[in-house]
Amino acid sequence: MPPTQNTTPAVEVRRIIRCARKASLATLDSSTHHPYASLVALATEPSGAPVLLLSRLAVHTRNLGADSRASLLIEGSDNIEDPLAGGRVTLIGRVEPTESQAARRRFLAVHPSAAKYADFGDFRFFTLKLEHAHYVGGFGRICSLKPEDVLIDVSAAAELIAAEPEIIAALNHNLAEDVARLGARLSGKEGPWRVSDLDPGGMDLALGLERIRWDFEGEVRDLASAKEALRTALATLR
């Protein structure tokens, strides 16, 4: 079995959200007021806040225009025989438009095909303003979490967030073998793993459509500390 980091419900929830590419969005139907569930593509802000790209023509977007209250069900049980034994989290809050360039950049990094329509007039990026989270980690593992348990504080990370594309490119170019080795040790699967996202608390690695998360032992601020965090991760997993 591949080695993993120590985990808590909060850590596991953050990993589920960061690694997910899709979620179930529940809104309140503006006509009937019944819950309306739909499938949406998902990415995250550096803080871990969910990012969505929605068309105003979609039913869920019209619902949000009338009432921004919503929830997202995100689950990580794709490779588990009994899906109810896997971890999942329901995020509850309000879905609001965002002009964040980081949100746009990170969403298109996870869903590059969305670049074909992201600039259409009827599409817009949204984020969930988290108010409450409910985690189920399998039978008997259930708890509620506050926003501060799920999201990380990036108030002092503006320079890192702005430099994220350059840092990721440098890691994937100059330390490609180390990145691939870390991905293989975490997942048990060999391949050209690449850093896909990076934030002060950790980095996400991708191999095709598969995504995994490594949480840093300390806070990363720049390329030098990102390289050091990668070397520390490899040393930890020896």
Image (cartoon, rainbow, N blue to C red):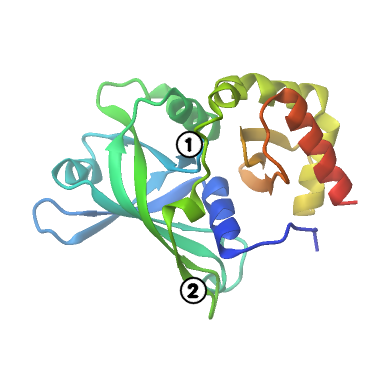
Residue type at mark 2? Ile
Looking at the image, residue 63 lies above or below residue 125? below
Of helix, strand and loop, which one carries label 1? Answer: loop
Residue under label 2: 142
Q: Picture coordinates of residue 205 (x, y %)?
A: 68, 40
**In the image, what residue occupies the spot 54% across and 75% down?**
141
Do residues under tags 2 and 1 come within 8 Å of each other at their CB atoms? no
Res 207 → quadrant: top right
Task: Report how far apart the C-alphas of labels 2 and 1 lie in the structure.
Answer: 25 Å
Res 90 → quadrant: bottom left
Q: Residue furthest right?
A: 238
Q: Residue furthest bottom?
A: 140
Residue type at mark 1? Glu
Question: Which circle's residue, 2 or 1, is located before the other in the chain?
Answer: 1
Residue under label 1: 45
Looking at the image, residue 61 lies above or below residue 167? below
Of helix, strand and loop, which one carries label 2? Answer: strand
